[in-house]
Amino acid sequence: MRYFRFLAILTVIALISSVLPVVPRSLAQDGVQARVQVAGLNVRVQPGTDSARVGSFDYNIMVTVTGREDQANNGGVWVYASADGGATGWVLSDFLEFPAGFDLNSLPVIEVEGVAGSGGVTVSGDALAGVTTGPVNFRAGPGTNHSIVAGLTAGTAFSATARNSNNTWFKAVVNGQEGWLYYTLVEINGDVSSLPVDNTVVAAPAGGAGGALPPAAPAGYSTANLGVFSFGAHVQSLAHSDLMHTMGMTWVKTQIRYSRGQDPNSVAGWINDAHARGLRILLGVLGSPGDVTGGDAYFQDYANFVGGLAALGADAIEVWNEPNLDREWQHGQINPATYTRLLSFSYNAIKASNPSTIVISAAMAPTGAEGAFGLDAVWNDNRFIAGMRDAGAANYMDCLGAHYNEGIVSPYWTTGDPRDNYYTRYFWGMVNTYRSLIAKPICFTELGFLSPEGFGGLPANFAWAGNTSVGEHAQWLAEAVRIARSSGSVKLVIIWNLDFQGSFGSDPMGGYAMIRPDGSCPACAVVR
């Protein structure tokens, strides 16, 4: 009887299979996965090369394809695809690698309506069709001090009807509403200089500083830049680039103090020299503490400067340095929400200039000293980062900056520091704490161990490192790089430092250096 029941079940399954179509599970539920075969593959509002771009796909990333156009158009079959955390839109299938044997005709057909190139918007007269390339505020007037009519998402089509005199704002119509859009977050088909200039003065509300954060620009950075762990060093000069390559370093860092009005081209030499030597460059850019009292006007100046550095080819930019201390931020005004505002302006300016430039949030000074000095002078790093999280900072960074430069035990240790067990004493204490606060990759823009050996005496506030030998300094650096590489959370380590000499004020920079005062480099062979 069991045998005949089994045959009956098989017969029923066969009958059902003959009636129901066979649909691949991945396509039926999630679309089909395909690999991008070219760098900067254009993603468009509608199928066709005359349609506006909404972004691009990086080389070798995986995208999800969920449909196709009903017939070949403009040189091939267009398919609808999306990247995790990236752009969504139409791309040519010729530039995608599908699973072996996959038939494009098995994709469902997506009906396309409207005018190619306008995202479905019909334009007339002198107007031009456009599309937003990222989240953007649609404002009542040409300026961020004007009220927001609506918040638009990437890929929103509009009709551009006018411009301001310097082409930085465009008057537009979206779904029958009129307003203004900022130039870095839109793409317009046609010659924008043909649009009439509208100098109509639109009354703006009083004030204009502070308020809601601007919408975040698309991330856009190359996944290759953060997808594989890499490391390098903070340097005084690039004279030791061959030694850096020998150790396996691919990054170099230098720090710049921005002065208002400074031309980004003043830093071009650093960028070009690093690239000529086969190194990627991280620029740590900070300003003067008193300047932050300038509010949004200063933040925009700073953002324009770092955007200029991105345009020159900076591979990564760290936005400010240790804003939880009054050494780097105005006394009495330390505030994670205020810093997040600076970060938001900077992120959008950088991505508008060069989407592949990695934006790293300012690393905090690792400290628990707020109880001793008060919040006017210092915030504990975990409190400050939690405040950044609450202010929305995760939307304006590719990587969370970190500094680990006070260790006197192996980075493998999680307890046993002779001073106390405050979490910043330990490499893992910092990684685990930061990871729990903001779910972003961690980039150590300073990671170092201080030793007085061969350097001389240490200032009183660095006496905690008085017993660290050069041998420990070398071993712990190598261990930290090894642990970071395998952590899964840390994507970049910049060793502090390679070649500094002497002290800067009370900071014993030479005691952190891999190249010691006698010219030897015990850490170099160990790190290699």
Image (cartoon, grey):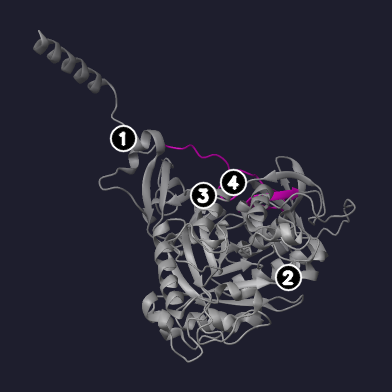
Under circle 1, the secondary element is: loop
| Nearer-N-terminus badge (4/2) | 4
Q: Earlier in the sequence, mark 1 or mark 2?
A: 1
- Name the foreground residue: 74 vs 500: 500
Disc 1 target residue: 24
**In the rendered image, which quarter is residue 377 located in?**
bottom right
Q: Residues within 10 Å of mark 1 (few under 14, many from 20)?
A: few
The verdict on residue 36 being magenta is: no
- The residue wearing badge 2 is 327
The CA span between labels 3 and 4 is 22 Å
Tell me if I can see residue 528 in this picture.
no
The residue that appears at 48% across and 68% down in the rendered structure is: 493
SS at badge 3: loop
Residue 117 x %, y %: 57, 51
Q: Position of residue 83 (x, y in %)?
A: 47, 49
Q: Is residue 128 within the magenta segment?
A: yes
The residue indicated by pointer 3 is 85
Question: Which residues make up the magenta segment?
Answer: 109-138
The earlier-in-sequence mark between 3 and 4 is: 3
Q: Which residue is drawn at the image coordinates 37% and 46% (left, top)?
A: 33
Classify mark 2: helix, strand or loop: loop
Left or right: where does residue 230 sit relative to residue 191? left
Crowd tier of the residue under label 2, counting other residues whose Cα lies within 10 Å: few below 14, some 14–19, many 20 or above: some
Q: Are marks 3 and 4 in contact (CB under 8 Å)?
A: no
**Dot 4 alpha-carbon crowd within 10 angstroms: few under 14, some 14 to 19, many 20 or more:** many
Which residue is label 4 attached to? Answer: 119
Q: Earlier in the sequence, mark 4 or mark 1?
A: 1
**Which quarter of the rendering shows the N terminus?**
top left
